[in-house]
């Protein structure tokens, strides 16, 4: 399961970049580098590092991403190697931005008590992106820009963009990404005005049921500390840690 967490994260980070003009994916065999061309480390990611000669490979990877002149994040998952990779990145001057708990559960039927649907058109995807962008204060314009540029690829990809609507307005969002042997949840968020109304539970429940109908038996996610209780209530169990390090040029 630990390998699935890393492999799904790597696929999620890269699967739109390779088919979107102006974006690129560099895979050297022991690490993945995803560069969106935007000045936003949400979409500029280093992941799936499995190094032998860690000291030299860390230095070479940092040289590569810093040459781009944009902020990046380096995600260290439960199967990244060496086992002390996060400590080595700290020693190389990369501070920890986030530390989350990797969790997994079986997919299958769930009770869903909120109206959730899958984005099917560019307008739907724009609704979805507007909710995700509002997760920052002020809202992040690069989130909207990224999904405008990648809209055609996104709607024809292995991701399902889940949207919750209240009174005809988008208020909650989550991404369900199939890859690396699992269904991964990302960008689970609710507008401030609609929080504590059960939207996250509805999105996850909808996604777990959808994943099962589309042939995926296992779901994974990375949980912030405050959300662990919610995910545990839906049947998720811990399977390791995911640590995000910030890279500045």
Image: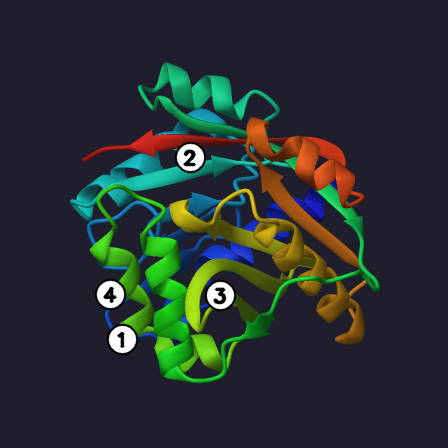
Residue topped by disc 3:
166
User: Would you identify the image quadrant in which residue 56 lies?
Assistant: top left
Mark 2 nearby-residue class (10 Å; few <14, some 14–19, many ≥20): some
Q: Please report contact status of discs 1 and 4: CB closer than 8 Å, yes or no.
A: no
Q: Residue 165 appears at what percent x and percent y?
A: 49, 67
User: Can you say whether 189 is above or below 12 in the image?
Assistant: above
- Of residues 241 and 112, which is closer to you in this image? 112
Mark 3 and mark 4 lie on one chain; the one further toward the N terminus is 4
Residue topped by disc 4:
145
Mark 1 and mark 2 lie on one chain; the one further toward the N terminus is 1
Which labelled disc corresponds to residue 53?
none
Res. 158 in view:
no
Mark 1 vs mark 3: in front? 3
Mark 1 and mark 3 lie on one chain; the one further toward the N terminus is 1
Q: Residue 140 appears at what percent x and percent y?
A: 25, 51
Give the residue drawn at x 21%, y 57%: 141
User: Can you say whether 209 is above or below 190 in the image?
Assistant: below
Q: Please report contact status of discs 3 and 4: CB closer than 8 Å, yes or no.
A: no
Q: Is residue 112 left or right of residue 13?
A: right
Q: Secondary structure at mark 1?
A: loop
Whole-angstrom CA distance, mark 3 to mark 4, is: 24 Å
Give the residue drawn at x 48%, y 44%: 47
Give the residue drawn at x 37%, y 82%: 122
Give the residue drawn at x 28%, y 73%: 148
Mark 1 nearby-residue class (10 Å; few <14, some 14–19, many ≥20): few
Q: Secondary structure at mark 2?
A: helix
Q: Please report contact status of discs 1 and 3: CB closer than 8 Å, yes or no.
A: no
The quarter of the rendered structure image containing the N terminus is top right
Res. 53 in view:
yes
Mark 4 and mark 2 lie on one chain; the one further toward the N terminus is 2
């Amino acid at each position: 399961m630990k390998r699935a967490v890393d492999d799904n994260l790597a696929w999620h980070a890269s699967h739109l970049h390779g088919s979107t003009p102006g974006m690129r994916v560099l895979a050297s065999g022991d690490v993945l580098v995803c560069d969106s061309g935007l000045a936003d480390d949400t979409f500029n990611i280093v992941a799936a590092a499995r190094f032998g000669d860690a000291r030299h490979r860390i230095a070479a990877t940092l040289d590569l991403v810093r040459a781009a002149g944009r902020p990046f994040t380096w995600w260290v998952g439960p199967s990244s190697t060496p086992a002390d990779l996060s400590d080595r990145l700290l020693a190389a001057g990369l501070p920890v931005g986030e530390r989350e708990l990797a969790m997994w559960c079986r997919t299958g039927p769930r009770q869903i008590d909120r109206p959730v649907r899958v984005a099917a058109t560019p307008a739907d995807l724009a609704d979805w992106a507007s909710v995700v962008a509002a997760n920052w204060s002020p809202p992040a314009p690069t989130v909207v820009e990224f999904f405008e540029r990648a809209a055609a690829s996104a709607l024809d990809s292995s991701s399902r963009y889940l949207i919750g609507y209240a009174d005809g307005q988008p208020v909650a969002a989550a991404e369900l990404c199939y890859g690396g042997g699992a269904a991964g949840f990302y960008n689970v968020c609710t507008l401030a005005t609609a929080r504590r109304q059960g939207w996250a539970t509805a999105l996850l429940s909808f996604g777990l049921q959808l994943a099962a109908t589309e042939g995926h038996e296992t779901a994974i996610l990375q949980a912030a500390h405050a959300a662990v209780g919610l995910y545990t209530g839906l049947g998720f169990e811990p399977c390791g840690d995911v640590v995000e390090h910030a890279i500045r040029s």
